[in-house]
Image: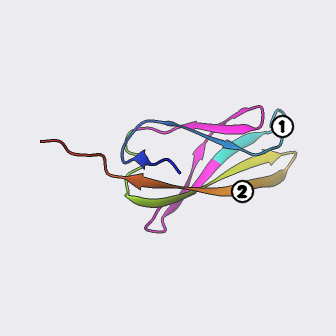
Amino acid sequence: MASIYKNTEIQLALDTGVNLSGADRVEIHYQKPDKTTGEWLGTANDTFVIYNVQEGDLDVVGRWFFQAVAYINGRVNKGEIAYYPVEDPLKLT
């Protein structure tokens, strides 16, 4: 599994396997390595929930968990949980 690096800007795309064209709202829920939780407002693109991670969002090194959540017709639909290691980038002197 590819690593991502602390405080970098990336595009996170989680595939739900379900067409999200009728979704009222999509989010990516996360759990940091220190067990802090939160969510980011995403955008729907076919079956994907997309979030452009901003500098400072990935602020803790360790294993992060992510889950796509789509609100469709008053129902909450959750995708599979994905995890990625977040590492410190190399510091060259």
Q: How many marks?
A: 2
**Residue projecting furthest to the bottom:** 35
Tell me which residue sits at (37%, 53%) in the image: 87
Residue bearing mark 2: 80
Structural crowding at the residue carrying mark 2, measured as other residues with C-alpha within 10 Å and reported as few (<14), some (14–19) or many (≥20): few
Tell me which residue sits at (17%, 42%) in the image: 92
Q: Main secondary structure of the magenta part?
A: strand
Residue bearing mark 1: 19
What kind of element bears circle 2?
strand
Which span is picked out in magenta?
A: 28-54
The amino acid sitting under disc 2 is Glu
Front-lying residue, 41 or 66: 66
Residue 10 in the figure: left or right of residue 67:
left
Q: Quick check: is 45 in the magenta stretch?
A: yes
The amino acid sitting under disc 1 is Asn
Q: Quick check: is 73 in the magenta stretch?
A: no
- Position of residue 18 relative to residue 1, above or below, is above
- Position of residue 11 relative to residue 64, above or below, is above
Tell me which residue sits at (37%, 58%) in the image: 61
- Can you give x and y, in whole percent of width and height, for residue 72 in the image? 83, 45
Front-lying residue, 39 or 2: 2
- Position of residue 5 relative to residue 30, above or below, is above
